[in-house]
Amino acid sequence: MSSLFQIGIGGSVGGACQGLEPLIRILKGVLKYVAIIIPIALMLFGIIDLGKAVIASDEKEVKSAQSRLIKRVVYAIVIFLVPSLISLVMNLVALGADQSETNTTDWASCWNSVYIVNK
């Protein structure tokens, strides 16, 4: 049974990526848009909920909307930091792996060197 890394090694593309460059490019592109769109949407929904509660003049609803807004802001910050956290994990995996089994430094350099091309 072969792993994703072994499949990438058999690729025909040279360099550190060994055929994984398109997959990493797609993953980084998706993460880029997720890290921007979802936090904005979460904060907008929180502001709309809080605005509805303020207009309704219900103190209980305002407190509930405030707590939901705070939770959404925290979630938005976490989602915004996901690409950085993934890069950190990729680098830690490369540093902590046994170098005799696989050449993880090539894998980490592949992750760090693939850039998203905006068209």
Image (cartoon, rainbow, N blue to C red):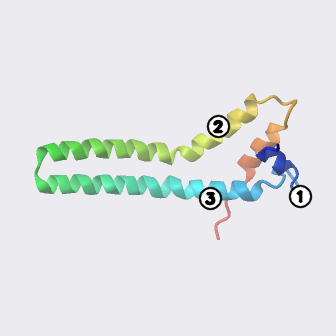
Residue 19 appears left or right of 57:
right
Residue 95 appears left or right of 18:
left
Graded by Cα atoms within 10 Å as few (under 14), some (14 to 19) or many (20 or more), the crowding at tag 1 reads few
Q: Which picture quadrant has residue 11? A: bottom right
Q: Mark 2 or mark 1, which has the lower sequence index? A: 1
Up-down: is 116 above or below 69? Answer: below
Tell whether label 1 touches label 2 (CB within 8 Å): no
Q: Mark 1 or mark 3, which has the lower sequence index? A: 1
Which mark's residue is nearer the viewer, 2 or 1? 1
Q: Which picture quadrant has residue 6? A: top right
Q: Residue at x 89, y 58 (%)?
A: 12
- Extreme residue in the front direction: 1
- Secondary structure state at the residue bearing disc 3: helix
The quadrant of the image that shows the N terminus is top right
Q: Report whether residue 27 is seen.
A: yes
Residue 23 appears left or right of 67:
right
Callout 1 amino acid: Ser
